[in-house]
Image (spheres, grey):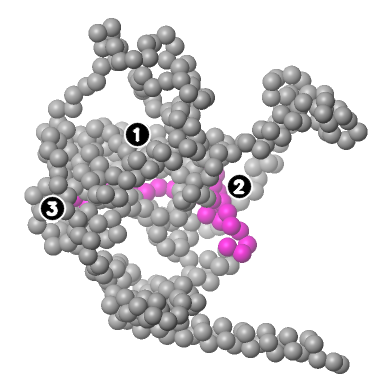
Amino acid sequence: MTLPDAAAQQLPDYRRRHPIPVGVLTKVSGEPLDLRDTVTLNTNIFDNKNYFRVMSHFNRERPPERVVQAKGIGAFGYFEVTHDVSSYTKADVFNGIGKRTPVMTRFSVDLGTPDGYRKTNYYPLHTYEIYNKYGEIFFVKFSFRTEIGVYNLSNAQAAAIRAEDRDYYSRDLYNAIAAKEYPSWRLEMDIISKDDITRVDYDPFDMTRLWKKGTYKTVPIGRLVLNRHVDNHFKGTELAVFSPDNLVPGISGPHDSVFRSRKLAYTDAQNYRLGVNFENIFVNSPLYSKTYTRDGVPPVLDNMRDAPNYLTNSFNGPVPYVDEARPKYLPMILQSNAVDLQPSAEFYNEIVESDAHRQRIADTFAASLLTVRGDVLKKALQLITLVNVDLGHRVILALKKLRQESAQTKREQLTKCFADVEPN
């Protein structure tokens, strides 16, 4: 079913909600703005302080965009617990069937070419350590599985959509929420016990691979439902930050080196983009906070009012707590750096469900290799063939076809060029 294009109706909807002007236009300082100061025509521009204030703000109105996944869309919703997982984790957000926790999300495309953000699965990739109230440890991979079903675009469909509507993904998500067809995902976790993780015959902490079937069990946790738009994209989405180091008691987090570096890099990037007080921006602010971090550039909120700016437990300042269940050992994770094509082979052989999907993968590989020459191309084709002989064969055939089509196009362009310069 085609969704109504609510995204295109945002301006008309605003006018319907506000049938008369919403008020008197003011300067940023709050002074009413005279009509003659709204333009620079036939005025002394050097006396028009409003012009200079507006332009100086315009020149500084956006923080630097995200370096990775710069384009995205946000939405609000809730996470609801549907299953009892207290035997695995003490995390409050995952305990208490029926409990709902407010959620803010930001989407950008982490797998393939899906037919919209709401029609694909999402995987946090890392292997997380979790623990229950008794201090028992488990290792898990989380998965968000779409409840509407997974739908992918062919290369031709994606190219056509990209030419017509570069906001296709964002528009689809916006329209679905507007139509009350709320996007939703099931949250599951694949679990391996602390003892079993030492006996598997692959690297379970390698974020580029899937765990082998039969080495883990899958446990459902709950549902993520998005039911509310971000009312202001800049305030609600571009100022929102996400740090992998923000974890709750019951989830220790991953121990791999990539995650460790992310814990440092994400916070540093957020300090640079939004300033050291980015946690005081409304969309990022915690529901409960007692800290001695204060001052700096706005926003500073109430700046802790009259609280001392140093830790002073003896004068009834906030005190740290002790998580008795928190694991007391420091795990030693040994990771393999060997080149391993097994995860890619398992994906092609077991995850990919149709011949058409396999051909799309081959066509995508071929397109990326079209301009590659010499030894680099030879090595790439060897690696692809080692993943799967059928995949290598498909890529070689697709590459030959693309080269033939490219050569034919060049011949036609050359013929047309000569025809255009021939005398009548």
Mark 1, secondary structure of its residue: strand
**Residue 44 at least partly seen:** yes
Q: Name the residue type under label 3.
A: Ile
Contact check, label 3 and label 1, Cβ < 8 Å: no
Within 10 Å of disc 3 (Cα), the crowding (few <14, some 14-19, many 20+) is some
| Among numbered discs 2 and 3, the one appearing first in the sequence | 2
Q: Which residue is mark 2?
A: 6
Q: Which residue is mark 3?
A: 197
Q: Relative to residue 345, is residue 78 depicted above or below?
A: above
Q: Nearer the viewer, residue 341 or 171?
A: 341
Within 10 Å of disc 1 (Cα), the crowding (few <14, some 14-19, many 20+) is some
Q: Relative to residue 244, is residue 365 depicted above or below?
A: below
In reply to whether residue 63 is colored magenta, the answer given is: no
Q: Which residue is mark 1?
A: 100
| Among numbered discs 3 and 1, the one appearing first in the sequence | 1
Residue drawn at x 14%, y 44% as measured from the top left: 331
Residue drawn at x 19%, y 56% as measured from the top left: 335
* Extreme residue toward the top, this view: 315
Mark 2, secondary structure of its residue: helix
Residue 262, image x, y percentages: 34, 45
Q: Name the residue type under label 1.
A: Arg
Q: Which residues are magenta?
A: 162-191
Cα distance between the residues tagged 1 and 2: 27 Å
Residue 223, image x, y percentages: 34, 44
Residue 305, image x, y percentages: 44, 11
